[in-house]
Amino acid sequence: MPNKTKYDANFTAGGIFYNEFSNLKSYVLEEDFEDLVKNDIEENKILAITTLSARKRIVSEIIRRHKIMPLVFWEFFQNLNESESRLALFYVCLKTYPIVFDLHFEVTVKKQKLGMELAEYDLQMRLDELSSTSADVENWSEKTIKKINTQYRKAIKDAGLYHKDVLRKPLNINESFWVYFKENDEVWFLDACFI
């Protein structure tokens, strides 16, 4: 049965972008955020990304992620500690990229509920399965599939959910952090964090 979900491989531009969004934290509420970030492609005063080609790719994905989320999320984001910020940026990835959401709920959450470790192979199996049901994934090169696998594992590690193949609940998260997700009908994110 064909999978109707539209997958893209843009997540390969790089993980949760913690450093980049940290540098942009004071700008995310600005009306001209998109222009500010686009201008930084040439100026490189905010993002501090070494190469122009990397800045272009990353800025494109930062803008995409910023647009996906409502202003109330970026207001919430302003007051988070580092662990919470990392987790919140993983939430943004889950909302932005269907492939990340799929891998997380079809593989990672299931593995964690069973008390099992997560290996590269587990994700590869899911990506292979998707390549037989999704024309989007079927058209990805082997290199792209490997990069999705690698970037996804890096993202859950950076979010504090994964360490040396072991899936774990996030640390240093205040109870008040979870209130945002409960109040905004996003309780599924608690499941995503093994809560």
Image (spheres, rainbow, N blue to C red):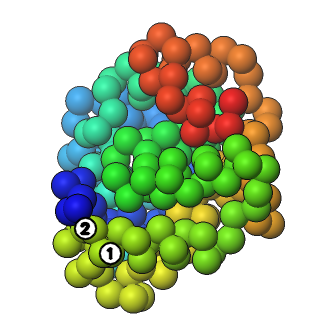
Q: Which residue is mark 2?
A: 134
The quarter of the picture where the C terminus appears is top right
Instruction: Identify the residue at image location x=43%, y=49%.
Output: 101
Taking 111 as reference, is 33 above or below it? above
Residue extending furthest toward the top: 183
Mark 1: amino acid: Ser
Q: Which residue is mark 1?
A: 131
Residue 161 placed where, x, y %? 70, 49
Instruction: Identify the residue at image location x=53%, y=63%.
Output: 152
Pick whichever, 108 or 93, lies toward us.
Answer: 108
Q: Gap in Å between the C-alphas at discs 1 and 2?
A: 5 Å
Pick whichever, 136 or 59, lies toward us.
Answer: 136
Residue 148 placed where, x, y %? 45, 72
Mark 2: amino acid: Ser
Residue 153 placed where, x, y %? 60, 65
Residue 81 badge: none
Instruction: Identify the residue at image location x=21%, y=46%.
Output: 35
In this rendering, position of residue 82 left or right of residue 125: right
Q: Quadrant of residue 47?
A: bottom left
Classed neighbour count for the residue bearing mark 1: other residues with Cα under 10 Å, few (<14), some (14–19), many (≥20) = some
Q: Secondary structure at mark 1?
A: helix
